[in-house]
Amino acid sequence: MDSDTNSCADDALRERRIPRTLLATIGHELRTPLTSIRGYIETLLEGEFEPATARRFLETARREALRLGRLVDGMLEFSLLDLSTEHERGTCDVVEQIVATIEMLSPMAAARRVTMRSALPERALARVDGDACVHALANLIENAIKHGSERGTIEIACTHDAPYVAISVEDDGRGIDERAGASIFAMGVRGDANGRAGCGIGLAVVKAIAERAGGDVRVESSALGGARFVLRFAEG
């Protein structure tokens, strides 16, 4: 078989893989808001709450349902991992998105008895769309919940690191092998979350969103004993 034939075969193989990658990415990104909505509804069905608390739970579920709709609309237009596609950048208050994401993932954290602590400024504007910011944060915090210790602690902080807004997410799990380096942000690289293998998509999505917003993401060791992810967006 000559080189031209080999090249054509490789191109055909890549074309078959693209729809699989896109479908896997869509499935992964839809799962988090769906899990949050289900968690809050199940919580309401299983217990009795003060009207104000019940309303807050329902408002969170409604907010996630609306975000889910926007996410579906966006995915009809482009893949989250297609970095060559131009997108209009929005601006958001990262602190608001962190608070919303923590609330969204509270049922998941409660299921593992994980405590989420945060240290946040009053405001931190960044040049990133609000929904995209939540997508990235949700992947990092969900990752920390899964990889951290049961009954453990997650620390989330936001600081001004001119010319960036930096968000750190730390867990007390087993940490990241230093040899893994940047490869954990590659599509298809799977982690092991306390015996449950990941799908190798979440961190790739975080990297894609960060780079689209003029920022970056890295991982290092945490003082808690696990991993510390630092996500940066350009200041707004």
Image (cartoon, rainbow, N blue to C red):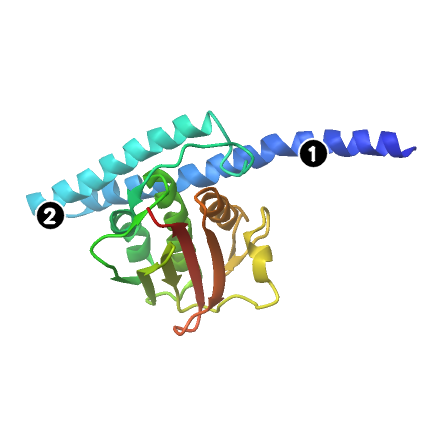
Q: What residue appears at the point 32 percent right and 64 percent down from the top-left corner? A: 155
Callouts 1 and 2 close, C-beta under 8 Å: no
Label 1 packing within 10 angstroms: few (<14), some (14-19), many (20+): few
Image spot of residue 55 (x, y percent): 13, 41
Distance in Å between CA atoms under marks 1 and 2: 52 Å
What amino acid is at disc 2?
Phe
What amino acid is at disc 1?
Arg
Q: Quadrant of residue 143?
A: bottom left
- The correct choice, above or below, for 54 with respect to 152 in the image is above
Image spot of residue 111 (x, y percent): 31, 56
The residue singled out by tag 1 in the image is: 14
Q: What residue appears at the point 58 percent right and 46 percent down from the top-left corner? A: 187
Q: Nearer the viewer, mark 1 or mark 2?
A: 1
Q: What residue appears at the point 22 percent right and 46 percent down from the top-left corner? A: 43
Question: Is disc 2 placed on a helix, strand or loop?
Answer: loop
Mark 1 / mark 2, whichever is N-terminal: 1
- Which quarter of the image is occupied by the N terminus? top right
Q: In the displayed image of the protein, which residue is found farthest to the front? A: 163
Q: Nearer the viewer, residue 102 or 148?
A: 102
Label 2 packing within 10 angstroms: few (<14), some (14-19), many (20+): few
Q: Quadrant of residue 21?
A: top right
41 displayed left or right of 216 = left
Q: Is residue 185 visible?
A: yes
Q: What residue appears at the point 12 percent right and 47 percent down from the top-left corner? A: 53
Q: Is residue 34 visible?
A: no
229 displayed left or right of 177 = left
233 displayed left or right of 97 = right
The residue singled out by tag 2 in the image is: 49
Image spot of residue 176 (x, y percent): 52, 66
